[in-house]
Image (cartoon, rainbow, N blue to C red):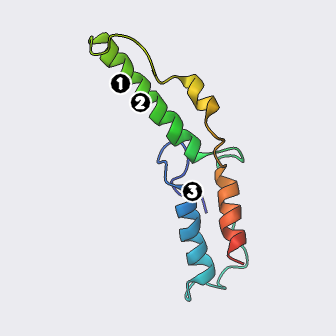
Amino acid sequence: IGHFGLGSIYHNPPEELAEIWRDLLMFDPVLRGQFEYVILAFEGPTQSTTHYHWDRLLRSKEREWSRRLAAGGISSEPNRPTAEQSHSSPPTPMDMAVFQFVFHSAK
């Protein structure tokens, strides 16, 4: 099973998608037991859709701040969002780890 809308394009929430796949593959009466094994494919082991989401949000805030500053809507730059702030935020879970946790907790 491929990408499922995770990653830098669709930004679907990994935990929600993992729960959907878990419920379908492990608890759906029609699908349960129909597959000997399932391979879930990820872009890479360090892919973090949550990180992509927060990074995109920060870039959007930086652009808005720059537009307002250029238009004269802001007289100074206190509390300006910066890329450095993303390094001070808590680490985001990797998509593969989220899926492993969700599927492991279903046992």
Coordinates of residue 59 in the picture (x, y in percent): 46, 28
User: What type is the residue that disc 2 sits on?
Assistant: Ser
User: What type is the residue that disc 3 sits on?
Assistant: Pro
Residues under labels 2 and 1: Cα distance? 6 Å
Q: What residue is pinned by disc 1?
A: 64
Residues under labels 2 and 3: Cα distance? 22 Å
Residues under labels 3 and 1: Cα distance? 28 Å
Q: Is residue 21 left or right of residue 73?
A: right
Q: What residue is pinned by disc 3?
A: 14
**Residue 55, above or below 22:** above
Q: What residue is pinned by disc 2?
A: 60
**Residue 68, above or below 92:** above
Q: Residue at x 55, y 84 (%)?
A: 28
**Residue 71, above or below 22:** above
Q: Is residue 36 left or right of residue 80?
A: right
Element under label 2? helix
Quarter holding the N terminus is bottom right
Quarter holding the C terminus is bottom right
